[in-house]
Image (cartoon, rainbow, N blue to C red):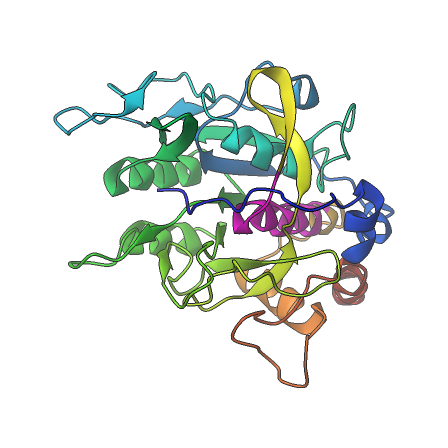
Amino acid sequence: MLPDTQLAAESSLTASHVADMIYLPYAKAFTRGRSDVRVAVLDTGVNLQHQELQGKLAPGANFVNLTGLDTTGFIGNFLGADNVSEDEVGHGTHVSGIVAAKGLQMDEGVCPECTIMPVRVLATLKVGDRLTGAGIVDNINSGIKWAVDNNADVINMSLGIRYAGGGLPHQDVIRYAISKNVTVVAASGNDGTAERYYPGALPGVFAVGAVDDTGTVTNFTSYGANIFVVAPGLNIYSSYAHNTYAFASGTSQASPFVTGTVGLLKSYALDRGHRLTHHEISTILKATSDKIDSRLRNEHAGYGLINLADAFKLLTHWIN
């Protein structure tokens, strides 16, 4: 299920400020991504006709199938998996815009030339007047496996499930993804506690926390997962359902900034004839993110706020 999103309640960050916080313009001088670098967005789907994403979408899939379960409160398409990954909620479209939007009526995505693979793993749950994404582990696992087997380079999972006994959620399929050199980026959660959300709390997954416009970790960032890095996540403006736009806050919004960064790094390395491994990407981000204090790793901020200028300087040193 999606962690509860912290709704935007303060003045929004300007697009240029968000980009400047992570030194995105510097990175885009090296690359804007490549169409053969595929970013799988496992979420509520994607608004397939959104103007910001036209020409950027690979064929997707819908793994939502709640057959045999109590579906009280669910609406829309929730019975029987198919190939229609349309977003009924808006969450997956918001995430996808942060990764790869054209920049028509919003800031351009982090990796605008990368390709989005829309993978719908969350159904539409109506809670009062609000729509949110909710799903089951088996459906999400199927989506992860499909994304890996269909040549995803990086998977964004702005979602989380609490551990409720038995095997850890997604553990085997995440191991499979990492063994295939697919980087998995996930939201750390939005309850501001030490609660662990999965897959973010699994080894090897890049769990991402959110910072505000000053670079301070937000009070809603959950820190039970072994947070890897943090990224902007307060009042982010992006594409939404039905060809609209919206502001939203949460670690769900921070995660795609890191996912887009991985896409840029992989793209530039491929331009130079090098295919970055998951371990190499992890090493780059650990070494180049801006620490929030004197410790190598902070419980609430991981290795720090992503710094794309330093990341590309290190990558350039490695492969040139």
Residue 17 to residue 118: above or below:
below
Magenta highlight range? 248-267
- To which quarter of the image does residue 104 belong? top right
Q: Quadrant of the C terminus?
A: bottom right
User: Residue placed at 37% from the left, 57% from the top?
Assistant: 197
Front residue of 85 and 72:
72
Majority secondary structure in the magenta region: helix
Front residue of 99 and 189:
189
User: Residue placed at 78% from the left, 40% from the top?
Assistant: 32
Left or right of 137 on screen, residue 103: right
Residue 244 to residue 33: above or below:
above
Residue 252 lies in the magenta stretch: yes
Front residue of 224 and 103:
224
- Estimate the x, y position of residue 16 in percent, counting from the top left: 84, 45
**What is the number of callouts on the image?**
0
Residue 139 to residue 64: above or below:
below
- Estimate the x, y position of residue 209 in percent, counting from the top left: 55, 59
